């Protein structure tokens, strides 16, 4: 998919995220908007995961460690054909359905149940290590939140990834610098993050995590260094794409009102029109 | 055959080594625990089938779940005391809730590490895991049960937790005994009372039954090696056809075998006299496993005394 189409996809995904959160009455709005460009490029450009190959081991794998941004994941899985858009619109956060507010394998296309933070990287390490042991070529992608990195288990897993030289593991940090309480640097400082991961044995690339072309380019460059796990430090904006949500902490899990939804959708429609006009 | 066999975790390690030679997809994952787990020889002979993650039990379980997701037959081996508390959230979410058939193996379980103190005791694991959905719980009583459990879980489709201890264990079963996960084994028939035991104290329950026989009391001894799925029929049969039940476990008296039995009996309306024997609600006295067992009445004499009290014999 070319850059233009990827950009249009991101806008469409943002609309769906807002609509399903509004309709479901709950969700992690801003985090889904910050990471949706990453998921877009992963599923539409970098990874070979499809409904047809999903039951096979010998394909790429994706573990969403920051499970609370499930609305972005469900939106993209629907677009990939794992289930219908209609199911997503009508079932998210509805009693008696499988579409709970964190990823579950009962929803087609979800690889691992997440929601408790600090779990995904270890599981991804296990999957990547199995590929190395069996000399298989699949790669394992995992998306972590930045606030999540306060969980010590993430660093246990990072040590193991380097120890086993898992250059088939691609860890992406959604570095939006906000968590529910406030700035990550005020809650429990993470910086210098790049140096920390380098010290743990990772090959690190920083990228604008809301720029689909830049993301595609950096993911095309994997592995960054033979024998080292890959870390993509994706600098993002929480709430990206909706002016009044961008970098505002209250939108962590605030649900837009009817008027706010309409304003946001109008902004995104205008952004899509500008993109089309520029062609 | 000597009456006393090997430590169960030695039998586990030796048996798994033999099975793993024919199953290259078997992987042991350890947390600097291969020595405690008697797995040094396994690591030397099958170095490609053991994964070391260092002293990091949360990572141990998460990595194991990922390996299982890739189709490996995974044994996550670590001291039970750390494995079932430090990594409880990983067991819950990454193994049980995510439905990855990891074999979670708690070594040196219960008070096996006796003298090392309460940091190293696992008197909580049955309780912690009983209230987590989708993980079976097994504690073999002797070498035969250990081998049988291992045979059973090689092809196991579900998450399972198995715990082993460090002391040589008395043989309790003939080699042709039928073993099935979730089906209790009656070691000895009796009518006056039933000892229902799980894991390593089972031999002591048998010892108590042998003592009581000399006093004219007929005691059934049931090895309830599987706590989940639980053999309700064996419990109800004991409650209806013998005069009393004593449960015996190397675990807190809270939340384990005893309370499991009590809950079933109460809800079935079966009011057979019942006594739960285990470790009381305290950090244990200092001692090795035998000393701690003896101190809390998990001994042949102690259990015989509890039986006399329950049956009001000689009172």
Image (cartoon, rainbow, N blue to C red):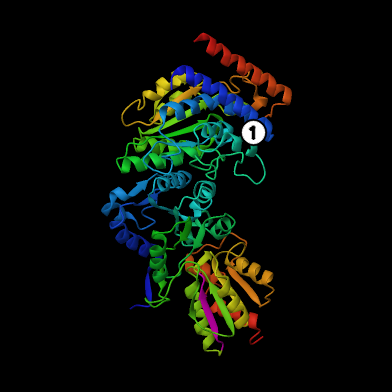
Q: In percent of the image, x 55 and y 70: which residue is there?
A: B231
A2 to the left or right of B92 = left
What span is in magenta? B217-224
B149 to the left or right of B96 = left
Query: Height in image: A221 above or below B132?
Result: above
Residue marked by disc 1: A27
Q: Which residue is farthest top?
A: A278
Chain letter of disc 1 in the image: A
| Most foreground residue, B172 or B252 | B172
Q: Position of residue B183 (x, y in %)?
A: 50, 71
Q: In percent of the image, x 62 and y 78: which residue is there?
A: B239
Q: Position of residue B214 (x, y in %)?
A: 52, 89
Instruction: Using the rendered image of the protein, determine whether residue A275 is visible from the camera's viewpoint.
Output: yes
B96 to the left or right of B176 = right
Q: Position of residue A2 (x, y in %)?
A: 43, 19
Q: Which residue is farthest left?
A: B45
Query: Height in image: B241 above or below B8?
Result: below
Q: Quadrant of the N terminus of chain A?
A: top left
Query: Height in image: B190 above or below A64?
Result: below
């Amino acid at each position: 998919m070319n850059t233009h189409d990827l950009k249009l996809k991101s806008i469409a995904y943002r609309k769906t995220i807002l609509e399903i959160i509004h309709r479901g009455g709950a969700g992690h709005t801003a985090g889904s908007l910050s990471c949706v460009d990453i998921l877009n490029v992963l599923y539409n450009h970098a990874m070979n995961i499809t409904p047809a190959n999903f039951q096979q081991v010998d394909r790429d794998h994706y573990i969403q460690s920051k499970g609370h941004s499930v609305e972005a994941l469900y939106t993209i899985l629907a677009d990939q054909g794992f289930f219908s858009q209609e199911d997503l619109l009508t079932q998210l956060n509805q009693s008696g359905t499988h579409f709970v507010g964190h990823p579950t394998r009962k929803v087609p296309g979800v690889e691992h149940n997440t929601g408790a933070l600090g779990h995904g990287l270890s599981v991804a390490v296990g999957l990547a290590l199995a590929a190395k042991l069996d000399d298989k070529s699949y790669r394992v992608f995992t998306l972590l939140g930045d606030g999540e990195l306060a969980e010590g288990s993430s660093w246990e897993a990072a040590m193991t990834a380097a120890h086993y030289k898992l250059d088939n593991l691609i860890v992406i940090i959604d570095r939006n610098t906000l968590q529910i309480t406030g700035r990550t640097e005020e809650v429990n400082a993470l910086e210098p993050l790049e140096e920390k991961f380098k010290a743990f044995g990772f090959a690190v690339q920083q990228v604008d995590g809301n720029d689909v072309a830049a993301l595609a380019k950096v993911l095309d460059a994997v592995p960054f260094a033979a024998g080292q796990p890959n870390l993509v430090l994706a600098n993002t904006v929480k709430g990206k794409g909706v002016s009044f949500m961008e970098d505002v902490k209250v939108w962590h899990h605030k649900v837009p009102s009817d008027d706010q939804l309409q304003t946001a959708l109008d902004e995104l429609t205008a952004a899509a029109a500008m993109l089309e006009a520029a062609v | 055959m000597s009456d006393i066999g090997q430590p169960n975790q030695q039998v586990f390690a030796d048996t798994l080594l033999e099975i793993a030679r024919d199953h290259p997809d078997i992987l042991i994952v350890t947390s600097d625990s291969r020595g405690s787990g008697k797995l040094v020889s396994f690591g030397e002979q099958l170095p490609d089938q053991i994964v070391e993650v260092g002293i990091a039990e949360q990572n141990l379980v998460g990595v194991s779940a990922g390996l299982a997701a890739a189709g490996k037959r995974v044994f996550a081996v670590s001291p039970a005391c750390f494995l079932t508390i430090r990594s409880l959230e990983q067991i819950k979410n990454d193994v049980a809730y995510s439905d990855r058939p990891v074999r979670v193996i708690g070594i040196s379980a219960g008070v096996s590490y006796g003298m090392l103190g309460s940091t190293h005791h696992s008197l909580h694991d049955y309780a912690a895991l009983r209230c987590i959905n989708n993980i079976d719980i097994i504690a073999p009583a002797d070498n035969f049960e250990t081998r049988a459990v291992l045979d059973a879980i090689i092809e196991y489709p579900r998450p399972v937790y198995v715990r082993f201890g460090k002391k040589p264990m008395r043989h309790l079963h003939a080699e042709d005994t039928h073993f099935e996960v979730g089906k209790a084994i009656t070691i000895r028939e009796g009518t006056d009372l039933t000892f229902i035991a799980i894991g390593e104290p089972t031999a002591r329950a048998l010892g108590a039954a042998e003592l009581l026989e000399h006093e004219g009391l007929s005691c059934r001894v049931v090895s309830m090696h599987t706590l989940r799925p639980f053999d309700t029929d064996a419990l109800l049969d004991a409650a209806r056809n013998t005069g009393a039940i004593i449960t015996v476990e190397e675990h807190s008296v809270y939340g384990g075998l005893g309370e499991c039995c009590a809950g079933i009996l109460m809800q079935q309306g079966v009011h057979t006299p019942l006594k739960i024997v285990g470790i009381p609600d305290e950090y244990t006295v200092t001692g090795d496993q035998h000393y701690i067992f003896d101190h809390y009445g998990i001994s042949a004499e102690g259990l015989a005394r509890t039986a006399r009290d329950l049956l009001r014999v000689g009172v």
